[in-house]
Image (cartoon, rainbow, N blue to C red):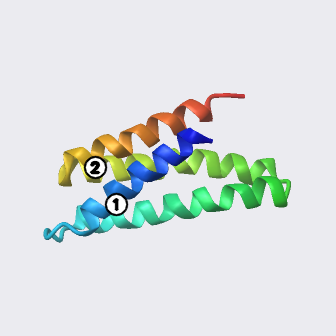
Amino acid sequence: APIWLFLNVTSLIALFRIANAPERSPARTLFLWSEGVAWVLFAAFTTVYFLLHSPVLASLDTVAGPLAGLVSLVCSFRLDRLSAWFILLRVLWLVLVMGTP
């Protein structure tokens, strides 16, 4: 879907900006970990839902994604405001689709 292409590109830009920032801080480390978790969740969704036919695991993935995004959002807001806006787009989309039946 085109929205996921856009969200993935903006998320990668945010990740690139913060990962290559000269400042090293606990917020940066937490951001990198939460983004890593978010990408694993994104990659795992297709497997758990379509291959394993597990709506329960897919639901857990769907709830965990926005939580990882919120952690990234809080951390990125402290580090780089433009990156925070990029992450906010993904978090808003995940919250929207989480509430869609």
Q: Which of marks 1 and 2 is nearer the N terminus?
A: 1
Disc 2 target residue: 83
Q: Where 27 falls versus 97 (above or below)? A: below
In the rendered view, does 78 fall on the left or right side of 67? left
Res. 56 mark: none
Disc 1 target residue: 15
Give yes or no for contact between labels 1 and 2 (Cβ–Cβ under 8 Å).
yes
Q: Image quarter for residue 53? A: bottom right
Which residue is outermost to the left?
23
Q: What residue type is labelled 1?
A: Leu
- Looking at the image, which is closer to me, 61 or 45? 45
Quadrant of the snapshot with the C terminus: top right
x 40%, y 67%: residue: 33
> Could you say whether the residue bearing mark 1 is in a helix, strand or loop?
helix
Quadrant of the snapshot with the N terminus: top right
Counting other residues with Cα less than 10 Å from the Cα at mark 1, is it few (<14), some (14-19), or many (20 or more)? Answer: many
Counting other residues with Cα less than 10 Å from the Cα at mark 2, is it few (<14), some (14-19), or many (20 or more)? Answer: many
> Could you say whether the residue bearing mark 2 is in a helix, strand or loop?
helix
